[in-house]
Image (spheres, rainbow, N blue to C red):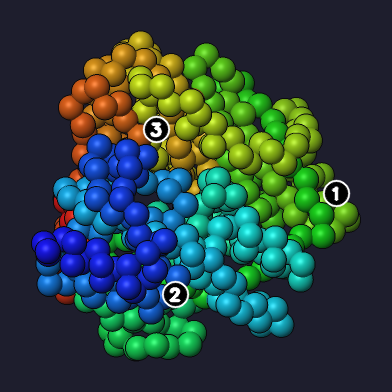
């Protein structure tokens, strides 16, 4: 009996035969084909599965809802998919304290529906909430437009439990399984793409659901005019919850703003907005306007790229202009949606070679103004660009942290910056 068969038998004993299966083509990540899919039912089972990898050096890819598996570099190796699908419980909703403890495999929509019964919410608006899981959202740091008012995921998470590659369950904040002195695990795990440990459960602080809300849109005649509006609104006493600017090839820039308050509060906020933007006249629009970035991924037929940009708020107009000019030079169509915080998404369409050149040029331009560009999707018909770009002087610290928590490179090998 080979070592592989012995290992599979051990896994079946740990989690049950029905929860271990051969991986199919639909389980591939970035063209890398894993061998097995394992679905533990508890965090203890998940930790024991990881403990099995410590000696043979198996490469493990954690997976939640699978909505963002393409984000990051392709893994160098992929032996097992470690699914959190069965870890889907809401463990404790302390509604009087505005906190919730939830397992990593719970979808965001399930969580929000349960919280809403007590008039509360986790103040994020992630992509594809009906499929995206708590662990996946944390690992990819997908906060959304509510970040402007409530902060990023690192501001909302107050506790996390990680299964480390050696099978240790380590926790920080909330109810502790094992304390790890010196590391702020919630912040480390958020945005780490599952390269340091597998998130098994998280504790969040919550916010009340708003009594009322209104979404409004207005257009500007030029990007310079829009930039003035952005700065005027951000410097004002408006208590807006979200604010995004959308633009595309040969179209006027459009701004969307969300207010949440009582009826009287909404009326006062809308009146103040009217005075700030003058003759541009904001029109009420459906709340679905905040889901526009989901359309950037549909459909992806081969000659499209989706990138995430981060720029200074004062450079938003310049950035949109640079994207438009560069895309025009390479004969590409483009769409952009950027939050007033300077974080945004861009979809580019056209010839695959020209897409690659455009992304390289835009990455250089973003860097010159203190910004960054991360590739979330790119064509597979040309040589792949590095997802992350230049990370500056942070790499030695990141590498040391990876070596400390995952010395064998078990989790998501190669997917993070510089192949971490």
For disc 1, the neighbor class at 10 Å (few under 14, some 14 to 19, many from 20) is some
Q: Give the mark, 2 or 1, whose residue is nearer the N terminus.
A: 2
The residue under the point 70% across, 78% down is 95
- Screen quadrant of the C terminus: bottom left
Distance Cα–Cα, label 2 vs label 1: 49 Å
Q: Is residue 296 above or below residue 57?
A: above
The residue under the point 56% across, 17% down is 251
The residue under the point 59% across, 20% down is 252
| Residue 47 disc label | none
* Residue 409: x %, y % from top left: 16, 63
Q: Is residue 254 left or right of residue 314?
A: right
Distance Cα–Cα, label 3 vs label 2: 35 Å
Q: Is residue 323 left or right of residue 175?
A: left
Distance Cα–Cα, label 1 vs label 3: 37 Å
Instruction: Report whether residue 276 is seen.
Output: no
- Describe the element under mark 1 as helix, strand or loop: helix
- Describe the element under mark 2 as helix, strand or loop: loop
Quarter holding residue 21: bottom left
Mark nearer the viewer, 2 or 1: 2
Instruction: Name the residue beneath numbered marker 3.
Output: 306
* Residue 219: x %, y % from top left: 66, 26
- Screen quadrant of the N terminus: bottom left
Hey, which residue is sitting farthest right in the picture? 264
* Residue 100: x %, y % from top left: 60, 75
Marks 3 and 2 close (CB-CB < 8 Å): no
Instruction: Name the residue beneath numbered marker 2.
Output: 42
Marks 2 and 1 close (CB-CB < 8 Å): no
Quarter holding residue 17: bottom left
Instruction: Name the residue beneath numbered marker 1.
Output: 267
Q: Give the mark, 3 or 2, whose residue is nearer the N terminus.
A: 2
């Amino acid at each position: 009996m080979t070592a592989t068969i012995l290992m599979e038998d051990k896994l079946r004993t740990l989690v049950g035969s029905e929860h271990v299966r051969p991986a199919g083509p639909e389980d591939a990540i970035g063209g890398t084909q894993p061998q097995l899919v394992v679905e533990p039912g508890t965090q203890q089972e998940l930790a024991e599965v990881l403990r099995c990898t410590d000696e043979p050096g198996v490469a493990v890819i954690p997976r939640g809802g699978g909505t963002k598996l393409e984000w990051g570099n392709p893994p160098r190796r992929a032996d097992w998919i470690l699914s959190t699908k069965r870890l889907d419980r809401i463990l404790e909703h302390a509604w009087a304290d505005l906190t919730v403890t939830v397992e990593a495999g719970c979808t965001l929509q399930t969580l929000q529906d349960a919280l809403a019964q007590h008039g509360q919410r986790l103040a994020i608006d992630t992509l594809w909430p009906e499929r995206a899981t708590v662990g996946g959202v944390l690992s990819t740091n997908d906060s959304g437009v509510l970040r402007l008012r409530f902060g990023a995921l690192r501001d909302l998470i107050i506790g996390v439990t990680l299964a480390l590659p050696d099978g240790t369950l380590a926790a920080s904040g909330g109810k502790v399984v094992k304390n790890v002195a010196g590391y702020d695990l919630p912040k480390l795990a958020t945005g780490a793409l599952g390269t340091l440990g597998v998130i098994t459960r998280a504790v969040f602080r919550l916010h009340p659901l708003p009594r009322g809300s209104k979404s409004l849109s207005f257009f500007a005649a030029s990007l310079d005019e829009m930039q003035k509006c952005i700065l005027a609104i951000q410097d004002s006493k408006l208590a807006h919850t979200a604010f995004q600017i959308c633009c595309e090839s040969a179209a006027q820039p459009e701004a969307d703003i969300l207010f949440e308050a009582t009826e009287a509060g909404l009326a006062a906020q809308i009146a103040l907005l009217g005075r700030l933007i003058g003759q541009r006249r904001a029109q009420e629009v459906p709340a679905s306007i905040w889901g526009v970035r989901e359309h950037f991924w549909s459909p992806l037929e081969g000659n499209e790229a989706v990138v995430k940009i981060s720029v200074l708020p004062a450079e938003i107009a310049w950035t949109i202009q640079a994207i438009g000019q560069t895309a025009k030079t390479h004969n590409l169509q483009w769409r952009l949606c950027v939050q007033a915080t300077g974080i945004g998404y861009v979809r580019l369409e056209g010839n695959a070679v020209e897409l690659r050149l455009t992304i390289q040029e835009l990455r250089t331009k973003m860097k010159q103004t203190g910004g960054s560009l991360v590739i979330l999707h790119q064509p597979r018909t040309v040589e792949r660009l590095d997802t992350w770009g230049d990370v500056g002087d942070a790499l030695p610290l990141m590498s040391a942290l990876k070596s400390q928590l995952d010395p064998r490179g078990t989790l998501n090998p190669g997917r993070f910056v510089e192949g971490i």
